[in-house]
Image (cartoon, rainbow, N blue to C red):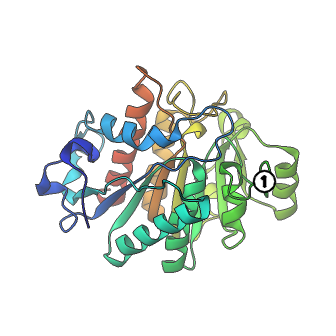
């Protein structure tokens, strides 16, 4: 599999730690954008994350070691030019399937949340007992948005048609249709008012998951004070340390078989959100391989 130049790869790693053959982790930049409903620019998210990652210190204070030694390979950005949402998801599905066949761990960088469907299909095909852990400000459970079932606002509805084992946290904006869907289907949703005001038990949170978990993170699930770089920001949201606490426990208790970070919309000269996402990805790699 081809690889990105050092200037474009995650952490800016030399070939010793970034060739496909030597790497356990594969970064898949997927700059798909077609249905954004407020601000545009999520297609620029993967590039911004990769650029910011080159400023991340590879020694981790918390775990006292370097995570990059597992090998982190970055593929060239997928080209979605002229492709529909379905075709774009198919392309990511094919790329991810190859990564999984080679026994590597896929980390997809979006792009709008729609593109997660391609990663999901590949993971679900390999892990039929898959469940989904979802961080987001929005439920994304509309059957369609503006007539489009492949909208970024419909990705959870689309996934739940074949994989209803999902749990969502950080949610603080839904429409009436979603509220009715959540109630009717008894979807485990931890609303932001609960997590921020009354608290929650992570054991209860994880009880909705199977052993094999797909982690999908829309960066608007975090507080705008941590990550302002998104097209549909919402007040409230998860903070840095509480998120790391959740993720560390998730990786310890479950087999996270793949993950994505989506809806990053870079803001010119405001890079701390880009850096926060890059560092969180690196922390997740550490939690997966070193704790």
| Left or right of 260, for residue 49 | left
Q: Residue furthest top?
A: 269
Q: Tell which of 1 and 128 is nearer to you.
A: 1
Residue furthest to the front: 82
Considering only vertical position in the picture, is 225 above or below 117?
above
Q: Residue 48: tell me if it is visible.
A: yes
Judging depth in this view, the residue of 144 and 100 nearest the camera is: 144
Q: Residue at x 44, y 22 (%)?
A: 268
Q: Quadrant of residue 131?
A: bottom right
Residue 52 x, y percent position in the rendering: 33, 34
Q: Quadrant of the C terminus?
A: bottom left
Residue bearing the label numbered 1: 142
Q: Residue at x 45, y 39 (%)?
A: 44
Name the element at disc 1. loop
Residue 254 visible in the picture: no
Q: Estimate how packed mark 1 is, as few (under 14), some (14 to 19) or many (20 or more) residues with alpha carbons within 10 Å.
A: many
Q: Quadrant of the N terminus?
A: bottom left
Q: Position of residue 56 (x, y in %)?
A: 27, 36
Q: Quadrant of residue 157?
A: bottom right
Counting labels gives 1
Relative placement, left or right, of 229 versus 206 is left
Question: Looking at the image, is 246 positioned above or below residue 22?
Answer: above
- Furthest residue toward left: 16
In depth, the one of 18 and 204 nearer the eye is 18
Q: In x, y percent, where is residue 64?
A: 22, 44
Q: Residue at x 40, y 25 (%)?
A: 271
Q: Position of residue 245 (x, y in %)?
A: 47, 44
């Amino acid at each position: 599999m081809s690889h990105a130049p050092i200037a474009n790869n995650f952490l800016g790693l030399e070939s010793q730690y970034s060739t496909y053959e030597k790497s356990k982790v594969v970064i898949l930049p997927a700059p798909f954008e077609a249905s954004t409903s407020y601000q545009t620019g999520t297609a620029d998210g993967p590039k911004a994350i990769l650029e910011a990652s080159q400023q991340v210190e590879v020694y981790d204070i918390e775990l006292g070691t370097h995570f990059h030694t597992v090998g982190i390979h970055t593929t060239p950005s997928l080209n979605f030019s002229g492709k529909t949402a379905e075709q774009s998801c198919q392309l990511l599905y094919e790329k991810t399937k190859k990564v999984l066949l080679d026994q590597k761990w896929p980390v997809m960088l979006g792009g709008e949340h729609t593109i997660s469907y391609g990663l999901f299909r590949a993971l679900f095909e390999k892990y039929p007992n898959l469940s989904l852990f979802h961080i987001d400000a929005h439920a994304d459970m509309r059957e369609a948005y503006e007539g489009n079932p492949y909208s970024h606002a419909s990705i959870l509805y689309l996934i739940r048609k074949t994989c209803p084992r999902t749990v969502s946290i950080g949610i603080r904006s839904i429409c009436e249709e979603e509220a009715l869907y959540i109630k009717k289907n008894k979807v485990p949703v931890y609303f932001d008012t609960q997590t921020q005001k009354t608290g929650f038990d992570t054991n209860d949170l994880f009880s909705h998951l199977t052993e094999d978990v797909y982690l999908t993170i829309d960066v608007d699930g975090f507080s705008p004070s941590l990550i302002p770089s998104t097209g549909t920001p919402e007040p409230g949201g998860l903070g840095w340390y509480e998120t790391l606490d959740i993720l560390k426990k998730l990786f310890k208790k479950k087999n996270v078989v793949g993950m994505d970070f989506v809806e990053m919309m870079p803001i010119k000269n405001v890079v701390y959100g880009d850096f926060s996402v890059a560092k969180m990805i690196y922390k997740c790699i550490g939690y997966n391989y070193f704790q």
